[in-house]
Image (cartoon, coloured by chain):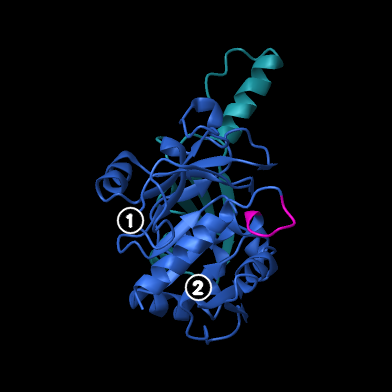
Amino acid sequence: MKVSVITFPGSNCDADALEAFALRGHEARSVWHKNTDLGDPDLLILPGGFSYGDYLRCGALARFSPIISEVYKYAEKGGMILGICNGFQILTELGLLPGALMQNKSLNFICRHQYIRVESVDTPFTHGLKKGMALDIPIAHKEGNYFIDEAGLDQLQDNDQIVFRYSNALGHITPEANPNGAVYDIAGICSNNRRILGMMPHPERAATPSVTSNDGLNIIKAVEAYFESSH
Amino acid sequence: MLKAKIFVQLKASVLDPQGKAVTNSLHSLGYTAIRDTRVSKYIELLIEEDDPEKAEYLVNSICDKLLANPNTEHYRFELEQA
């Protein structure tokens, strides 16, 4: 696969994402936000970090980067996009995913391992996974508290757009397992066409031999399997 | 020249964790009469425009496009001579 990772000023998980995909043998390339060429990727990644210093609202100012008009075009033609953490925040600010990421209920920056439960397997990112399985994927954010109004939540549920929910290690959804106060324990959602995923946890930080959890590989392998099956 | 004083607030339906923390702190200071706190953003814009109607149109579009997130926030503003 050809994987492009956009670097915004303040992105800091771009190199991790590049490494995670390069280690799997993919052609991973970095795209500076001032470029206007995405490099015709099979998968586009908006990485974690603090684009534009989180000024005004997290992800809000990334919209004015020159590369964004290409992101819109890529999304329009059905391109696969993975937004991780700040990337998820950017996708909501771009209007490519519904809802918003608010400050954590505790007001604390939370950096820790977190289990998430696979809710929908009908996405390229969960293709072939088992519904209900729990993945150990780290989180690191202060604004990860997903919010959407009731009508919006109904729509997400009706369209099976909720991809991951915070859970405990057994895959049980409990109040204690929700780290940030997110509505309906939502950790990740996909677009209507299912090809854009935004998630707060960092699969790229759980996908290399040097770290304790490799559960993020499940998501990378799912994308690979989906890509192979559709080519 | 006009100055816009803009207040960007979380919608009433959105939980405000900062406001909640402030309420709790006020209670621990003994201000038990405080029922709720909402923390908002206050933004000032200095506008090269003398016509209040044009300025109002401008500020509305600026708020809609950037300063407020319609998913979670609403805004109001006042204009004054600067």
Residue at numbered disc 2: A44
Question: Is A51 situated left or right of A68 in this image?
Answer: right
Region rendered in magenta:
A206-211
Residue at numbered disc 1: A122
Q: Residue at x 33, y 56 (%)?
A: A122
Tell me the subunit letter for badge 2: A
Q: Residue at x 55, y 50 (%)?
A: A200
Looking at the rendered structure, the kind of residue marked 2 is Leu
Q: Is residue A65 above or below residue B55?
A: below
Looking at the rendered structure, the kind of residue marked 1 is Asp
Residue A218, position as x, y percentages in the image: 52, 55
Alpha carbon distance from label 2 to label 1: 19 Å
Question: Is A73 situated left or right of A14 in this image?
Answer: left
Question: Is A170 situated left or right of A161 in this image?
Answer: right
Residue A34, position as x, y percentages in the image: 61, 82
Judged from the image, the secondary structure of the residue bearing numbered disc 1 is loop
